Amino acid sequence: MGGRLVLVIGGVRSGKSRFAERLAASWSPRVLYIATARPTDPELAARVAAHRARRPSSWSTSEEPLEPARAIAAASGEMVVLLDSLTLLVANALTHEPPLAAPAAHVERVVRDLIERGRAEQRRLIVVTDEVGQGGVALSPLGRRFADLLGDANQALAAAADHVYYLLAGLAVDWRALAAASGDIV
């Protein structure tokens, strides 16, 4: 199968997770789902429960809000890894209690590791993330820091990914394939 790195990106409620889940299921019945959400309120807990409920019983789940490499390294035999989501991992790094000494360095290290694992391992890695570059500039320093960090992480992953699926209203377009077809440098 060879290592494959796939980025699934889009706005909130664009269908990213469902698309990534369908893609993972099409590749293997054995999937390691790495969840980064920390359900801190009832509404987020309900979203997490809905995600859990639609996963097949053959999938295994690891909750890793900050260190997805731990789950990937511990996985035995899963050929597809689905990380949902990088967005929440970045938020976790910025809001961790006690505060991380260097959240940006942490995120950069995680992204480098995901890229290396996506290239080197004999499994496929799907990373789900939100596109933050289409909205206005955040009003708070934390919001701007979050957007900058996630935007940089998304760009690094997109540059290394074999496929970059952008979701809009549930429809996916592979931007890597479009760029290659148009002769753009990919």
Image (cartoon, rainbow, N blue to C red):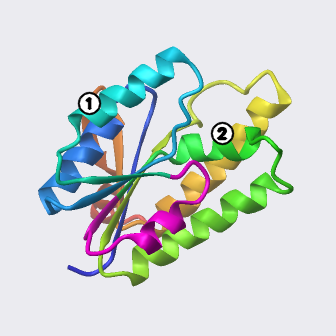
Q: CA distance from mark 2 to mark 1?
A: 24 Å
Identify residue type, mark 1. Answer: Gly
In this view, the mark in front (2 or 1): 2
Q: Quadrant of residue 124?
A: bottom left
Q: Observer-nearest residue: 5 or 173?
A: 5
Q: Observer-nearest residue: 55 or 173?
A: 55
The residue positioned farthest toward the top in the image shown: 42
Give the label on residue 170, or none: 1
Q: Is residue 153 magenta?
A: no
Taking the spot 51% from the left edge, 45% from the top edge, the residue there is 36
Give the vertical position of 48 relative to 174 (above or below): above
Q: Quadrant of residue 76?
A: bottom left
Identify residue type, mark 2. Answer: Ala
Q: Secondary structure at mark 1?
A: loop
Q: Observer-nearest residue: 37 or 111?
A: 37
Give the vertical position of 133 relative to 32 (above or below): above
Tell me: 31 left or right of 43. Answer: left
Badge 1: how crowded within 10 Å, few (<14), some, or many (20+)? Answer: some
Tell me: 129 left or right of 15. Answer: right
Residue range in magenta is 64-81
Taking the spot 51% from the left edge, 16% from the top edge, the residue there is 42
- Whether residue 186 is visible, yes or no, is no
Which residue was labeled with disc 2? 91
Q: Position of residue 61 (x, y in %)?
A: 35, 51
